[in-house]
Image (spheres, rainbow, N blue to C red):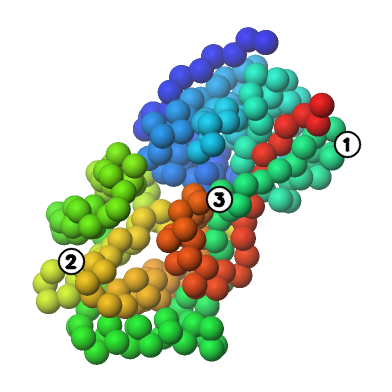
Amino acid sequence: MTYTEESLKLEHHEVLGEKLKEITTALSEYCFPNLYLFRDKHEYKILTMNNMLFLSGLSYNKERYLMPLEDLESCSEEYMKTLLTLLKKFDCIFPIPEKWLHLFPEEQFRQEYIEDDSEYIYNREKLAEYPGRKLSKKRNLVNQFLRDNDPEIKKIESESKPHIIELLELWQTRSVQEMGASDYNACIEGLRNFENLNLSGALFMTEGEPCGFIMGEFAGESSYVIHFAKGDTEKKGIYQYMFQSFVREFCKDAQIINMEQDMGMEGLRKTKRSYQPDKMLHKYRISPSV
């Protein structure tokens, strides 16, 4: 078994970005910016075998995995065969969306997922309106924020970046996570390469000062993936307002919003569940059954 590997770089965007767009899944790993910005944390490498591309990575629970870079429901038999050959060198194939499970029969493969990896999916209308009794507190917090503030929403552009950095540094000083453990560095790099990575987003201002921002991208299955969302928590209702107004104004072409996983962090899990997700998108790990 002979293959070459190299560390994931920004230069891979041109090739991998197009490949990933052809994969019909809303899983955030199938977005190049997500891979690139967290490349060091997951030790991503591009594998080439028989002129076909794959990705290797390290999961949060330290499993070495192999990730396909083609849609497995439409790829060639040779690609699938090569993927399974490479699997012998790894702990599992990951992340596999539920709709691909039929390609890995249970009599031959173990199909497992870890809840901490699962992504929170919301219908766009839910975040745009916060309908019903269960989301009444979200509506109330938005109203309180609007009573106390006169917010301005701007599309992220070059002149927005200093304001975002200012807010991000404030967020980091208040975070319980140390800088190396938080997504501070990934967010800074995403901002630095905002145009190159084809990201989009919005900056929220009150009284001329930054109070929040959201960065993400449109992805598969008519989804918008929110990669970063930071707000000044001293302004009550800021997050509820940001999600609602951002979805209303910037996600009109999306049907679902992906807020990604909680990584087992209890506070993050509680927050994301409070928005009443419509679906949990599981990421399956595939390994030989024997």
CA–CA distance in space, label 1 to label 2: 55 Å
Q: Earlier in the sequence, mark 3 or mark 2?
A: 3
Query: For the residue carrying disc 1, how many other residues have a C-alpha within 10 Å: few (<14), some (14-19), or many (20+)?
Result: few
Q: Which numbered circle lies on residue 116? A: 3
Type of amino acid at the residue the image marks with label 1: Glu
Q: Is residue 36 above or below residue 144?
A: above
Residue type at tag 3 = Asp
Tags 1 and 3 in contact by the CB under 8 Å rule?
no
For the residues marked 3 and 2, what is the alpha-carbon distance in whole angstroms?
31 Å
Calculate the distance from the C-alpha at mark 1 to the C-alpha at mark 3: 26 Å
Q: Nearer the viewer, mark 1 or mark 2?
A: 1
Q: Position of residue 51 (x, y in %)?
A: 61, 19
What residue is shown at x 44% (from left), y 60% (from top)?
268
Q: Are marks 3 and 2 in contact (CB under 8 Å)?
A: no
**Residue at image location 55% in from the left, 22% down from the top:** 47
Q: Residue at x 26, y 69 (%)?
A: 233
User: In which quadrant is the C terminus drawn?
Assistant: top right
Q: Earlier in the sequence, mark 1 or mark 3?
A: 1
Q: Which mark is residue 210?
A: 2
Q: Estimate how packed mark 3 is, as few (under 14), some (14 to 19) or many (20 or more) residues with alpha carbons within 10 Å.
A: some
Discs 1/3, front: 3
Q: Is residue 183 left or right of residue 118?
A: left
